[in-house]
Every structure is written in C-alpha cells, then in structure tokens.
Image (cartoon, helix red, strand yellow):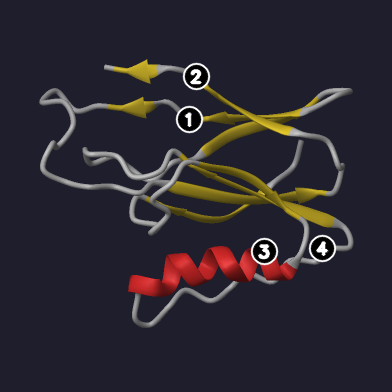
Amino acid sequence: MAFETLFSSSQSGLKEPTQEVLNSGDGLKNVFAIINSKRKPGIPIPDVNFDTHEVFVFSPGQVSHGVPSPKVQRMLQFENKIVVQLEPVEQNENGYATTVISEPCVIVAFKKTSLPVVVETTGMKN
C-alpha cells in the first residue's frame, strides 16, 4: 500500500504513547503544535487532502535511551485492517545511549480507507 512519510524524528515532543488515525486538518495541526512547541522555527504543517487521505501518527512515547527516528518499512492493507510495519532499530555495539531522553515519532499519509490501523515491529537487530 502506498504511503508518504510526513515526519520522522527521535525528538517529537510526544511524551505519551500514541497510535492515532487523523481524519482532519485540525488533528494534524494539534500534533504539529506539540512537535513545534520546542522548535524555533517550527516545521511547516504538511498539506494533506483529508477528502482523499488519512494520516497515521505513531509514537512509543518518551523513552529513556537514545533511538534513531522511526521509519515505516511498509503498509499492508487487509480486508479488516491496515498493518504498519516499522523498520527494525539497529543498536550499535555499545547498546543504546542511556543518558538521552527520546520521543520518537513517525507520521505517514495514505489513501483513505476507514480501516483500523495496527503497528507491527519486525524485531530488533543487534
């Protein structure tokens, strides 16, 4: 299934775990208000046609180690759901940086389906 990554960062400002489908510009503005609360200048809000597209926001929330920006590997559409598969996170040989607070997040847009969206991770590479 085709998708477009609108945002991916290890420092999003989203402190709580989030898995949300947005169906309006107001929802996207609210998310970017959080993302831009600590960024000067802020990141422009992506232009999305919500008549034809939906936006999915994924964040595990605040974590107590440094992680790279999450990336969507693929999205798969089934009869009853859409599955978002995230790329595996590869640790360096020293493990995670433990003195860094991260708030990873990825936001993608895709054609409107009105199906529920679930996230799958493909595991951790060492």
Q: Nearer the viewer, residue 51 or 3?
A: 51
- When the figure is inspected, residue 19 is found, relative to residue 7, above or below; the finding is above
Q: Are marks 2 and 1 in contact (CB under 8 Å)?
A: yes
Looking at numbered disc 3 in the image, what kind of residue is underneath it?
A: Gly
Dot 4 corresponds to which residue?
A: 50
Q: Which mark is residue 10?
A: none
> Residue at horizontal 70%, vertical 46%?
3
Mark with earlier residue (1, 4): 4
x 72%, y 69%: residue: 25
Give the SS element for disc 1.
loop
Where residue 94 sits: x, y (%)? Answer: 10, 26
Q: Disc 1 or disc 4, which is closer to the eye?
A: 4
Q: Which residue is mark 1?
A: 87
Q: Earlier in the sequence, mark 3 or mark 1?
A: 3
Q: Under tag 3, what secondary structure?
A: helix
In the rendering, at what x and y percent does residue 41 appear? Answer: 38, 82
Q: What's the residue type where badge 1 is placed?
A: Glu
Mark nearer the viewer, 3 or 1: 3
Type of residue at label 2?
A: Thr
Q: Residue at x 47, y 74 (%)?
A: 43
- Circle count: 4
Where 4 sits versus 58, above or below? below
Q: Residue at x 14, y 37 (%)?
A: 97
- The crowding category of the residue bearing disc 1, from other C-alpha atoms within 10 Å (few below 14, some 14 to 19, many at least 20), is some
**Residue where numbered disc 2 is placed:** 122
**Is residue 29 left or right of 102 when viewed as pictured?**
right
Task: Please identify, in this view, whether the residue under mark 3 or under mark 4 is nearer the observer.
Answer: 3
Q: For the residues labelled 1 and 4, say whether their Cβ atoms are less than 8 Å apart.
A: no
The residue at which mark 3 appears reads as 27
Q: Please tell me whether mark 2 or mark 4 is closer to you in this view.
A: 4
Q: CA distance from mark 3 to mark 4?
A: 11 Å
